[in-house]
Image: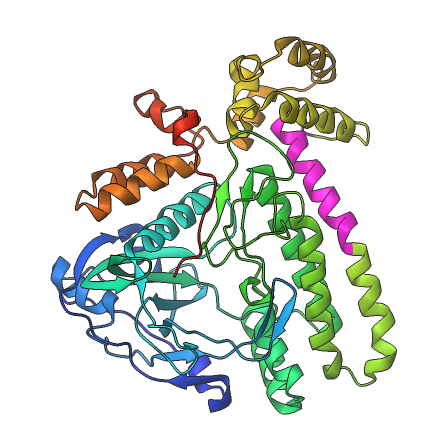
Amino acid sequence: MTLTIPFDNSYAALPEGFYTKLAPTPVARPSLVAFNRDLADMLGIEAPADDAEAARVFSGSSVPRGADPLAQLYAGHQFGQFNPQLGDGRAHLLGEVVGRDGVRRDIQLKGSGPTPYSRMGDGRAWLGPVLREYVVSEAMHAMGVPTTRALAAVRTGEEVIREAPLPGAVLTRVARSHIRVGTFQVFAARRDGPALERLYDYTVARHYPEVTDPGDLLARVIDAQAELVAHWMSLGFIHGVMNTDNCTLSGETIDYGPCAFMDAYHPETVFSSIDRYGRYGYANQADIIVWNMAQLATALLPLMPDPEAAVEPFTAQVHAMPERIRAAWERRFAAKIGISDPRPEDRTLVADLLTRMAANQADFTNTFRGLARGTARDEFTNRADFDEWETRWRARIEDEAEPDALMNRSNPAFIPRNHRVEQMIDAAVDGDDAPFHRLLDVLSRPFEDQPEAADLARAPLPEERVPATFCGT
């Protein structure tokens, strides 16, 4: 059976200033590492005749019928500094499909060759970041987090040069769209009113058809991002590079570069090797998303009939966002300790647990999962710290009908632990994909107890700890 993708492209119908149309650069010897058949089925994509055909298509070596490949233009604040033109420097949007669920999604290749936005880069990716994004994005999906997803990973048969020669790879990413805060910023910065209006109309039609004006769009995106970041934090997830060009209007997690999940809890945890001042550290994510929404508000102002008059209500929306994040955070963390209907005082109960976890270097994931198992105490170096908290906690959940069930739904047993991801990448570089497939399988069921995979739930030994993660180039 020939691989068939039912493209129904709309972004390519926007004016040429939104993108540059060009095909991916073919690779030498593409070979398939993974193909997400469940996702393909949901997208209405017919299975490929063989792995070789899938490898050709998802490496960019063979452009499928109906595709209209392009590289998207956008700008963005990177670590607080505005870059007026970024864009897809190593990615090609093949086109869009409307899935069996009626949702329109992009199909994009990452690492598929240079574009006019490459900024002196080679347009390629190496195998490690491709497999990291595949595993982490699929794990996030399994944990219920809005996210881009991975459809395929392909080795290119070519080397890319970073600090040393590394095996090249291409990831096929699926997203509800790749419209970013930075997409609005590029046209606002250029004072291109018609393009900004066209982008607004397109975004509303695609994501928020009930929206009536730019202020309403801002409110919807603020709501989506507030929920998203609270969800991240409830899982101990650190995005690592929350630039405005990595912040979607759809409210999906995008760009798994220096991302990581905490092992031992500490609110100031930072992994990204380029985040020298902790701007995008764990606890700062709630503040940064507010900052990003302020940039979106600024970009939307020119769309208002009276931009000056809109400054005050737009500002009020942004200033109200921390309370929205706080409410979402409290709801999620209350569920993590078995409370279905949180009270204001429960925030103190959660905060006290987190303080004690930080003081005892308790593992974030295993502590919360251990509350229902009765093993959380084992994560504390000073177990009396946990015992004192536990007495108050158990008194609080006495009236809860099914606290253990709620906790098991809210606390994953398995996350993509940094040391396991690095071990998986090392094995794949040596030609062994078995650890990748095993990790992917276990993480597809993160809330299930899987005794045979206990090693993947274990916190790292001191010599296994990964102190820094790197961008996905």
Whether residue 10 is visible: no
* Count of labels in the image: 0
The location of residue 179, given as percent across then percent down, is 53, 71
The image quarter containing residue 52 is bottom left
The location of residue 195, given as percent across then percent down, is 59, 88
Whether residue 157 is visible: yes
At horizontal 64% and vertical 90% (from top left) the residue drawn is 192
The image quarter containing residue 149 is bottom left
The location of residue 29, given as percent across then percent down, is 13, 65
- Residue 331 among magenta residues: yes
- When the figure is inspected, residue 381 is found, relative to residue 310, above or below; the finding is above
At horizontal 52% and vertical 52% (from top left) the residue drawn is 146
Q: Is residue 14 left or right of residue 464?
A: right
- Residue 277 among magenta residues: no
Image color mode: rainbow
Q: Is residue 73 left or right of residue 300?
A: left
At horizontal 15% and vertical 67% (from top left) the residue drawn is 2
Chief secondary structure of the magenta portion = helix
- When the figure is inspected, residue 202 is found, relative to residue 5, above or below; the finding is below
Quadrant where the C terminus is found in the figure: bottom left
Q: Is residue 174 left or right of residue 23?
A: right
Q: Which residues are magenta?
A: 321-340
Q: Is residue 408 left or right of residue 125?
A: right
Is 210 or 237 nearer to us in this picture?
Answer: 237
Toward the front, the furthest residue is 163
Quadrant where the N terminus is found in the figure: bottom left
